[in-house]
Amino acid sequence: MPSLIENYGLIGDLHGSALVSREGSIDWLCVPRFDSEACMAALLGRDEHGHWTLYPGAHVRRTSRRYRPGTLILETDHECDGGAVRVVDFMPFGDGKLHTVIRVVEGLDGSVPVTATLRARFGYGQYQPWIAALNGDVMLTTAPDAVVLRTPAHLRFDDKDVWGEFTVKKGDRIPFVLTWHPADERPPPPFDPEEALAETEWRWKEWSGRSRYRGDHEDAVNRSLIALKAMVYAPSGGIVAAPTAALPEAIGGVRNWDYRYCWLRDATLTLDAMMLGGYVEEAQAWRGWLMRAIAGAPEEAQIMYGIRGERRLTEFEIPDLPGYEESRPVRIGNAASDQFQLDVYGEVLQALYEARRLGLPEEAGARVPARRLARFIESAWQLPDDGIWEVRGGRRHFVHSKMMAWVAMDRFARILEEFTAPDDPGRQALPRLRALAERIRRDVLEHGYDRQRNTFTQAYNTHALDASLLLMPALGFLPADDPRVKGTIEAIERDLLREGFVLRYQTEHTGDGLPGDEGAFLACSFWLVDAYAYSGRRHEAEELFERLLSLRNDLGLLAEEYEPRSGRLIGNFPQAFSHLALIHSASVLDQEELTPRARANGHAAPPSPQPSA
């Protein structure tokens, strides 16, 4: 059975990744890419669906683990009857061809028996490999994939598994090297795992040591930056939303999605986070991925793409996989890529504006797609859409989507105002852009605001609430001291808080097309931190932020959601959106004077109309 979601640690090589449990089991391994078919998928089923376990054969009295400082190298210590051992797990940085998981069992004290079991099951746990010996190595093959296991430990195998037991004494270091390669090619030559460990540690420390963040939450922010770096697909610069698929938003429920893709929703937060840490190359690579993804017809932008910008993310189910703790169906691919979400156009234009504001030079040719996006919004902003949460219950006039249409007009106008020459012909569009932005804002104030309850609503002419409304002051749509913003925060506190954490929306009122409920969405809870801070409620902001930090697992990682009743992390893990929101909230709390980001950046927020507007 898989471990609790929060009991996993992430390792990766900037191409693919693996999850390692506290019990020393790799239950999820996707190589050579994050979105490759898992060759170990016990995470979404049982041991029979693929895992690789290294664990003491003696009684374990205590287990502790950590990442080596500034790295993604995982160390797990087991104190046992008779001694203590350490398992070091990591993936060396790949060159695009070599993708390897290395596990080193080190004797710390006494003498400890250790059991090894490798059960590879390609195709998401579906296909049993052909297992054979070759020059002392063990080959496991199911075309088009193969892995080779190299170790000095004595192992046995049959037609299903590889296994063995060996004794580790103090000072021993026994490596296990598992390398993926195409089944129709010879396995790559062996290499020194100790040299690979030293190089991997140096490269991670060199990267993390360049962080420029010096705020009050340095450990949390820098660990989040490392987690984000681990989710970068190096060849393209794209960042996956999570390295996992089909981990449930409610245990036993049906909200099980594949998050191994890149969402435009994350564009601005990603740029902000990387630039806050001083990682200009990663920010430029992400913006480059963004521009290539929307190239051709930017007005036809999807809400998400594959890690190289792929557009077809066909969704299907794997009925033979029982799902994490029986949470079915297991979905691979993501049909939400076909949805129409108005907000993504605002996200793209905001990201392009933020990139310039943060000091990145303009991407060559970027002004043309930006202009086309702005033109598209001029006609499309009045259309209903599927909304930021990708609900499958029909299109509506979502308030957040309209607000992001306003952002699109506002940010493109700022690009023209701040980053074009006074005599640039493009500036002639400024009056039209500003007029349209104001028209969209008036429309939201008229149709998306419930005067009786003094709150904005999820969609026009409805009573349901939505946590995305918390972004109004951060985006500069309305200032934090506007009575309607304060009323919206109070309404969300009243109706969307569960044990002090924020739900995305009211599932019983939204009609999202799916049965069941979900946990508190962690990014939304960080948005409430920001809203508190912007509203002058600093004590409450700091208190909630500390509570959110306490939800991280012992390795500093966050999932997508938190279930307050059971005290468990749920959803895909680790979740980039949660870590991005953490970094942003930390930067908000670091400000001496807490004001909406639009003001903090030196731009006046829109004037606040009277509450009767």
Image (tube, helix red, strand yellow):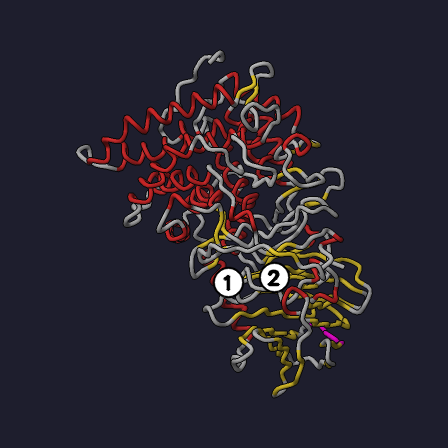
User: Does the magenta stretch mainly form a helix, a strand or a loop?
Assistant: strand
Q: CA distance from mark 2 to mark 1?
A: 11 Å
Q: Quadrant of the N terminus?
A: bottom right
Residue shown at the point (63%, 47%) measured from the top left:
559
> Residue 464, position in %: x, y?
62, 27
Q: Amino acid at mark 2?
A: Ala
Specify start and end residues of the magenta stretch as a single range.
165-170
> Residue 237, position in %: x, y?
43, 55
Q: Look at the picture and state if 398 lies above or below 178.
A: above
| Residue 158: assigned label | none
Kind of element beneath mark 1: loop
Residue density around tag 1, few if under 14, some if 14–19, many if 20 or more, within 10 Å: many
Q: Look at the picture and state if 320 lies above or below 372.
A: below
Kind of element beneath mark 2: strand
Instruction: Point out the residue furthest to the bottom here.
Output: 135
Please give the residue where the numbered disc 1 appears in the rendered image: 15
Q: Within the magenta stretch, is there residue 466?
A: no
Q: Is residue 523 left or right of residue 383?
A: right
| Residue 18: assigned label | 2
